[in-house]
Image (cartoon, rainbow, N blue to C red):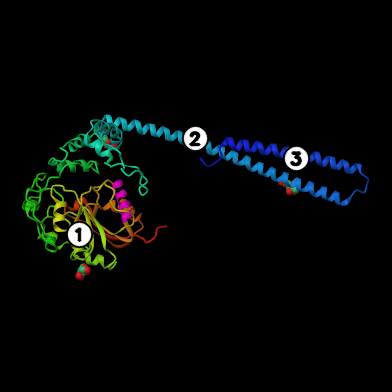
Amino acid sequence: MADLPSFKEWRSLAILLIFLASNFFMLFMGISWRSLSDHSASKFPADFRQDFALASFIATLSSRLNLTQAELHLTRHELVQLKQALQASQKLSNTLLTEATKCLRSSTSLNLQENLSVGQDLTYLGANLADLEAQGGELREFTRAHTLPLGWNAGTTASNMVSPIGHACGSETNHINLAKFMHYDIGGICPDDQALVQTLMVHGCEPLPRRRCFARGPPFFREPLPLPHSLWSIPPDDSILWSSYICKSFECLNGRKRRKVFDDCVDCFDLEGREKNRWTVSHNELDFSVDEVLLLKPGTIRIGLDIGGGTGTFAVRMKERNVTIVTTSLNLNGPFNNFMALRGVVPLFLTIAQRLPFFDNTLDMVHTMHVLSRWLPIRIFEFLLFDIDRILRPGGLLWLDHFFCVEDQLDAIYTPLIEKLGYQKLRWNVGAKLDRGPELKEIYLSAVLEKPLFRT
Ligand SMILES: *[C@@H]1O[C@H](CO)[C@@H](O)[C@H](O)[C@H]1NC(C)=O
Ligand SMILES: *[C@@H]1O[C@H](CO)[C@@H](O)[C@H](O)[C@H]1NC(C)=O
Ligand SMILES: *[C@@H]1O[C@H](CO)[C@@H](O)[C@H](O)[C@H]1NC(C)=O
C-alpha cells in the first residue's frame, strides 16, 4: 500500500487532468474560431494549403481530446478500484486489531490460571527478566550490551556485543531456577547443579547464560584411551561426575534393562550388548546398515549430524568409515555426553527444541533414531523437519531410523508432512512396532530420503 498513490493524490491528479483538458479545449476553440472567422473574412477561394493545415490541426486536437477523455475514464475506473481496496484493507485491519486484542486478553487470562503456555512466557518474560536484572549480578553482566573496545566492527556491522539467552529463561517456570543458576562465586567452583541446568534447558531456557565459575569435574579423571581403542571401551567410573544421576556407575546403568525401568536408552551404555551390532547388518526391512546407506552416495557422505544419538554408537560406526558425525544428546538419567566424548566422537549438548547450530545447506547427512517420533508435538516436528532441511546440503540424506507413530497417523499426518520436503524416497519401509503390544497399532517407518538438488 505504501507505494501506491493515496486516494487523495489520485483525486487531485484527476481534477488537474480535467482542468487541463477543459482549458486546453477552450483555448483551442478560441484559436480555431478566430482563424475560421479570419478565413471567412478573407476572400474566397482561400489558400487551400492553409485550410488543409487547419483541418488536420483540428483532427489532431480532436484525437488528443479523445485520448484525454479515455485517460480520464481510466483514471475514474482506477479511482473506484482504489476506493474499494482502501475499504477492504480498512476492514482487514479492523479485524486484525480485534483478533490481536482477543489474543492478548486470552493470554493474560491464561497467565492468571498459571497455565504454562507460550502466551504466559511472553507476557512474563519482560517483567521477570527485568526483576532479575534489577537485582544486578551475573545475569545483568552477561546479558547487557557490551561496547566493543575497538569500536564499530565492519564485519559484524555492530558496535557492541549482546549475549543471548533463551526467551523462556524469564518465564515463571524458569526465572527462579535461572536466578539460582546465576548465583555463584565468581572465579570459584560452580555449584553442583547439572540437574538444574537440564531442567532449565528442557523448559526452554536455552541457550543458558555463560558463567564465570569453573565447572565441576569428576574426582579422578584419567586420560582417555587412544583411538581406535576408545571407540568400543567403557571408560572407568572415575571419569564421570555422577552426582546428578540415580546410578553412580556404568554397571548400575547397564543393569537398568534387567530392572525394566522406564528410561530412554537403557541398554545404550552396554557396548557388549545390542549396541555392538547396531547398523552393521540389516536384520529386517527397518534396519539399514551404514554401509548400505553410504553406498547410496559413494564417497560423498562425509559430515553429518545424529539427532538424539544416545551414546554415540552411530557416530562411532561412521567414524570407522571416515565419516564425521556430531551427535546431539541431553544427559537424561545418564552421562551420555561424557560417554560419547570418552569414546572419541563429538557430543553436542542441545535439546530437540533448539535451532540446529549449523549453517544452511552444509551437512551431507542427518540421521535420527526414535527421537523424531510421535511424542513430539506435530507443529514442533514440522519446524524441526524444515530445520533439518535447512542444514542438509542439496543431495544430502535424511535417514529417519525407526520413526514411530500410530498406523492411522502415518497416512494422515506424517507422510504428507515428510513429502512436503519434496525428497526422493531412496528407502521407505514400514513395519509393525510390537514392543508395547499390537493393540496400540504402532508402526515404525525407516526411510532414507534425498534432498533435491534444486528447489523451484
Ligand atoms: C474519438 O472517439 C470516438 C469514439 O470513442 C470515435 O468514434 C472517433 O473516431 C474518435 N476520434 C478520433 C479523432 O480519434
Ligand atoms: C492450559 O492450556 C491448555 C491448552 O491451551 C488447556 O488444555 C488446559 O486446560 C489449560 N490448563 C489450565 C489449568 O488452564
Ligand atoms: C579412512 O581413512 C584412512 C586414512 O585416510 C584410510 O587409511 C582408511 O582406509 C579409511 N577407511 C575407510 C573405511 O575408508
The residue at which mark 1 appears reads as 315
Q: Earlier in the sequence, mark 2 or mark 3?
A: 3
Image quarter of the C terminus:
bottom left
For badge 2, the amino acid type reads: Gln
| 401 or 232: nearer the viewer | 232
Q: Position of residue 99 (x, y in %)?
A: 40, 34
Q: Which mark is residue 25?
A: 3
| 128 or 122: nearer the viewer | 128
| Quarter where residue 394 is shown | bottom left
Is 193 rendered above or below residue 326? above
Is 106 rendered above or below residue 332? above
Q: Position of residue 332 (x, y in %)?
A: 16, 47
**Secondary structure found at label 1:** helix
Alpha-carbon distance for marks 1 and 3? 85 Å
- Residue 384 colored magenta? yes
For badge 1, the amino acid type reads: Ala
Do callouts 1 and 3 mark residues in contact (Cβ within 8 Å)? Answer: no
Q: Earlier in the sequence, mark 1 or mark 3?
A: 3
Q: Quadrant of ligand 2?
A: top left
Q: Residues within 10 Å of mark 1 (few under 14, many from 20)?
A: many
